[in-house]
Image (tube, grey):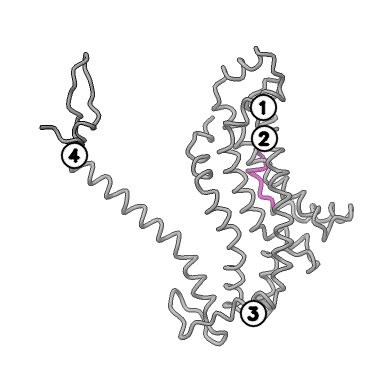
């Protein structure tokens, strides 16, 4: 007599005759060893990546009179360092300035990189490769070498100590990578898809916004997350171009804990922990899209 569960179980058929469902093959010793090695490597690298954050968190709990020594617990947990870091630096103003800059840089840089990536990856025009390699010089040249002339140029236009004076250089700084990223994604898109859209009468704008863009969102989301993290953590540009405390960003504000002869390590670590929270939130919320964009072949070509 067949049980109801067995009767309801699906069966494979071959020529109309039911056959048994094949059982999964047990893993071989070599496969188990490979899986174990992979998990051990992931655990080791995860610990290596986590140690700096854990060390910074421990230092943020040290009393002001106890020097930080390696990764060691303080003699007492001083959570008051976070309140002190927030008050001493007027951290609410610093975070607001960072948010204003990042929330303008990310969409502006994303739109520009989508357009340039589409031009270099899906369109055909003379000098396309030469112009693209010119864009790549932005990845090769250290931007620190341009800080001094950039400061004088922006000062001549009255943009020092303004949000625009920081937004424009940051957008330009990210443009090379974003162009490279989006071009690689559009190159990985089947050419037949673009040609079919052209045959149906779509122009270049319609091909981009209606055909290519819907499938490009994983790559775009990954790029936006990177842009946000880079903009939020940008230190040198903010330090040089935003000397007015009313418009300083959070990374530049960390310098308030370092004097000529003294350094408030616990306050600096507490402020750094507070500054890293928005980046962690953005990554945690968008991590699936971020990982999908990295693994979807968007860096081919």
Front position in the image: 117 or 224: 224
Image: magenta residue range: 135-143
Residue at the disc numbered 1: 208
Residue at left offset 75%, top offset 55%: 147
For residue 91, side relative to residue 60 (left or right): right
As helix, strand or loop, the secondary structure at mark 4 comes to loop
Cβ–Cβ under 8 Å for marks 1 and 2: yes
Q: Earlier in the sequence, mark 1 or mark 2?
A: 2
Of pointers 4 and 1, the one earlier in the residue sequence: 4
Disc marking residue 84: 3
Q: Nearer the viewer, residue 139 or 60?
A: 60
Residue that badge 4 annotates: 26
Residue 114 - label:
2
Mark earlier in primary sequence (3, 1): 3
For the residues marked 2 and 4, what is the alpha-carbon distance in whole angstroms? 47 Å
Q: Is residue 137 magenta?
A: yes
Task: Please tell me whether residue 254 belongs to the stretch shown in magenta.
Answer: no
Given residues 295 and 124, the one toward you in this image is 295
Q: Determine the CA span between mark 3 and mark 1.
A: 50 Å
């Amino acid at each position: 007599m067949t049980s109801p569960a067995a009767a309801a179980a699906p069966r494979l058929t071959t020529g109309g005759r039911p056959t048994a469902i094949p059982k999964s093959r047990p893993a071989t010793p070599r496969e188990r060893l490979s899986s174990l090695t992979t998990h051990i490597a992931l655990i080791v690298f995860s610990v290596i990546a986590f140690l700096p954050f854990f060390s910074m968190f421990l230092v943020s709990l040290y009393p002001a009179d106890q020097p930080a020594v390696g990764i060691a617990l303080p003699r007492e947990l001083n959570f008051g360092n976070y309140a002190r870091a927030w008050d001493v630096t007027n951290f609410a103003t610093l975070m607001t300035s960072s948010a204003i800059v990042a929330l303008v840089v990310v969409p502006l840089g994303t739109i520009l990189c989508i357009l340039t990536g589409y031009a270099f990856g899906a369109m055909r025009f003379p000098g396309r490769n030469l112009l693209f390699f010119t864009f790549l010089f932005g990845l090769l040249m250290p931007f620190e070498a341009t800080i001094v002339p950039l400061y004088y140029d922006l000062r001549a236009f009255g943009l020092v100590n303004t949000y625009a004076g920081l937004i424009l250089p940051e957008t330009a700084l990210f443009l090379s990578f974003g162009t490279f990223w989006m071009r690689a994604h559009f190159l990985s898109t089947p050419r037949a898809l673009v040609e079919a859209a052209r045959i149906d009468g779509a122009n270049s704008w319609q091909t981009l916004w209606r055909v290519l863009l819907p499938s490009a969102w994983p790559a775009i989301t990954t790029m936006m997350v990177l842009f946000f993290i880079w903009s939020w953590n940008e230190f040198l540009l903010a330090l040089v171009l935003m000397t007015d405390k009313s418009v300083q960003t959070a990374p530049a504000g960390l310098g308030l804990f370092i004097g000529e002869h003294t350094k408030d390590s616990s306050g600096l670590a507490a402020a750094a922990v507070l500054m890293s929270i928005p980046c962690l939130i953005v990554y945690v919320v968008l991590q699936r899209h971020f990982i999908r964009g990295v693994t979807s072949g968007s860096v081919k070509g």
